[in-house]
Image (cartoon, rainbow, N blue to C red):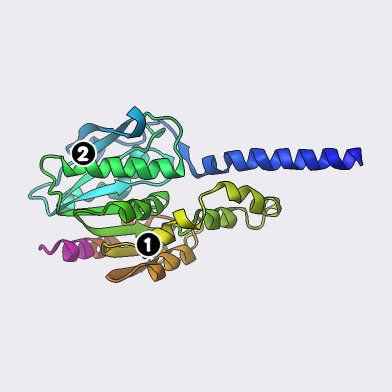
Amino acid sequence: MGRRLAKIVMALAFLGALSGCIERQFFYPDRTAYTTPAQFGLRSEDIWIPGPGGSRLHGWWLPAQGPARGTVLHLHGNAANISSHLPLVAWLPGAGFNLLTFDYRGFGESSGGEPTLDGVVDDSLAALRWLRQKPGADPQRMVVLGQSLGGATALRTMAQDAAGVKLLIVDCGFSSYRGIARDAVRGSWLRWVAPAALLALPGTAADPVTAARSLKVPLLVMHSSDDAVVPMAHGQAIYAAAPEPKQWLEVQHTQHVDGLTHEAVRQQVIAAMLRALRTD
């Protein structure tokens, strides 16, 4: 009986440790400088956004080349920092759009401690507030582009504050925190203990797909049919949940968030932005 009890205690301790760290598995930040705006021939300004709790969020302001058609707020994925994600969006200034890309707390040069799923939403709201005050950025002509984790975060951000945003683009975003975690452990031994550990993650009320149902901004959902990181079913669930107006863009023969590296896909995204911004 004592040995059995010891095994139960050990199992509970393991589950507790797993539950405590499972949210951290959504984030893989670092401070390595992978690229710079200058490498893409872009003018840039290092900016600092006042974040929650006295944190400072580092970002790059990249003005449009020529008259600005609008301003894009970029919410990046869960790894590295803005310098590794810049190649996915560095084409936007050349297409006539101002670009703000920034690092969540704990990423790159940003302070504020370790990132959390709720915390990156707060950081994104802070970036949106900063952007509305930025000279040269029309606060009534904004687009929010979220990729992967940034797509999930963008949905929750827009459900809280979408003033001035004319289009939300979700690129390979996931619909549910617990759902994507289950997908990640499917096929491994962790699937047997995951149900208990997943209870530590935000529930249905905080899910991106729940936020999608309350959107009051036009939505473009784009997803790779070959995405091995976030299955396309997540993008389809987001699209199905969102009210009109909305658009679905299935990107063929690309991997996770690789769609915007292809010129044909970029042109479709530009067209969607210009329709939403009612400009030419």
Place of residue 113 in the rendered image (x, y in percent of width and height, measured from the top left): 43, 30
Which badge, 1 or 2, is on the more N-terminal residue? 2
Place of residue 90 in the rendered image (x, y in percent of width and height, measured from the top left): 25, 46
Q: Which quadrant holds the C terminus?
A: bottom left
Q: Nearer the viewer, residue 99 or 123?
A: 123
Q: Secondary structure at mark 2?
A: strand
Give, as a three-letter code, the residue at label 2: Trp
Q: Secondary structure at mark 1?
A: helix
Which residue reaches farthest left? 67
Type of secondary structure dominating the magenta stretch = helix
Question: Residue at the location (73% across, 42% down)?
Answer: 12
Q: Which residue is mark 1?
A: 212
Q: Is residue 48 above or below residue 78?
A: above
Quadrant hosting residue 82: top left
Which residue reaches farthest right? 1
Direction from residue 98 to residue 14 in the image, left or right: right
Q: Which residue is mark 2?
A: 61
Q: CA distance from mark 1 to mark 2?
A: 28 Å
Give, as a three-letter code, the residue at label 1: Ala
Task: Evaluate whether residue 41 shows in this view.
Answer: no
Span colored in magenta = 270-279
Mark 1 Cα-neighbour bin, 10 Å: few <14, some 14–19, many ≥20? many
Question: Residue at the location (34% across, 68% down)?
Answer: 249
